[in-house]
Image (spheres, rainbow, N blue to C red):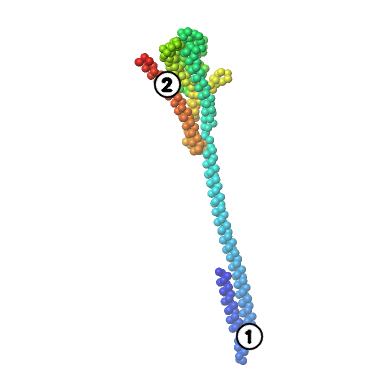
Amino acid sequence: MRLRQKSKKLTKLGLMASLFFSACINANATGYPVADLTAALGLLQQTEQAVDQFRQSVKEWTKQLNADIAGTSAEVDALNNGFANSIVRQNQALNDVFNNELKMQMQPSSDACSTYSVSNALNDAMCDFISSVADASQTRVSNFLNQDTTYKPQIASQNNAKNILDAAYKIQKEATGESGDPQKPSDLVVRADILLGSQGDTYDALTTQSTKTFNNIVVGAKVVTPPPNKNQGDGLNYVDNYLRPTAIRAIAANSLDTIRALRVGQKGEDGKIDSPSVMQLMQKFADDHFGTPEGDEWLKKVTNTQKSADDFMSDSAVLRSIAQMQAYSNSLNMMRYRSELRMETIQAALLTLKNKEVYGN
């Protein structure tokens, strides 16, 4: 646009020069035109100067235009760089957010290792617990039915009673040393608080024997005399008066032995108890999460109320801890369910005895 305007100005200058040149030609008296060369040369010089001046202006205009173009290009580049940098920073921020979320999702629960250790140890303890109850049940049935001896029932009952007393005397000697009366049973064998104690620990050697003797005393030592079992009438008597009382005593013994086995630790290769019991392991898990200094620290981590932000737990880690607690709760519910089954069995046995008392059968 600017060049076009300048070209128009040059055209005007040319026209003006032509007019000035024409003005330099004069007519004399004869009527012939006479040229004024001096004026023409001066006018020509002026024209050349105007052309040079125009060319210089074109150069300046060109430089200005190039500068404007370069400036505009720089502005475009700067704008593009700004957008590019903004996109890079935005992508980096998104990557950082994603990486942080991924890191938090991978953050393990603060108690994951201890929980797995307790669960793994509890698995072994439960195996010993089940085996212990089964072995005790088998021994009691053999004693009740006098299956392992050829003694008469009365002699077998006396033998069972003697074994119970001997165990009570031995416990007395171990508990009191030489100062105790060797012919006096230990008070420990009639302490229900030891069997039913809620300390959540593992029996030591003395309490292990004491609770075993306690259960034997409760269940009794008498062996029922089996009636003859040759005909239908004898068979009825055999079931009602021999197998039935033995089965009912076995129900009571099973509950007592189950309660006891929960606090009996696992035996090592040397036969000594060297591992925690089921009760102790479950108590430890509960203590690690509630009602103790360790439990308070765990609660602070889960709720992010501790002083150091480095110990804060992510939502994913908290969810995993909740899953661990739910698994523990499920285990307790299953143990409670088995306990309820034993209670219902005992109630059914008591109802049977009451029915026999009232109706005679």
Q: In the image, residue 64 lies at what x, y percent? A: 58, 65
The residue lying toward the viewer, choosing from 319 and 354, is 354
Q: In the image, residue 142 lies at what x, y percent? A: 49, 14
Q: In the image, residue 9 lies at what x, y percent? A: 57, 74
* Crowd band around label 2 with a 10 angstrom C-alpha radius: few (<14), some (14–19), many (20+): some
| Residue at the image position 46 percent from the left and 16 percent from the top | 215
Question: In the rendered structure, which amino acid carries the disc numbered 1?
Answer: Ala
When the figure is inspected, residue 304 is found, relative to residue 92, above or below; the finding is above
Question: In the rendered structure, which amino acid carries the disc numbered 2?
Answer: Thr
Q: Secondary structure at mark 1?
A: strand
The residue lying toward the viewer, choosing from 101 and 356, is 356
Residue lying furthest bottom: 30
When the figure is inspected, residue 271 is found, relative to residue 23, above or below; the finding is above
* Crowd band around label 1 with a 10 angstrom C-alpha radius: few (<14), some (14–19), many (20+): some
Q: Is residue 186 left or right of residue 39?
A: left
| Residue at the image position 39 percent from the left and 18 percent from the top | 352
Residue that badge 1 annotates? 35
Residue that badge 2 annotates? 345
Q: Which mark is residue 120?
A: none
Q: Is residue 282 visible?
A: yes
Q: Is residue 186 visible?
A: no
Q: Secondary structure at mark 2?
A: helix
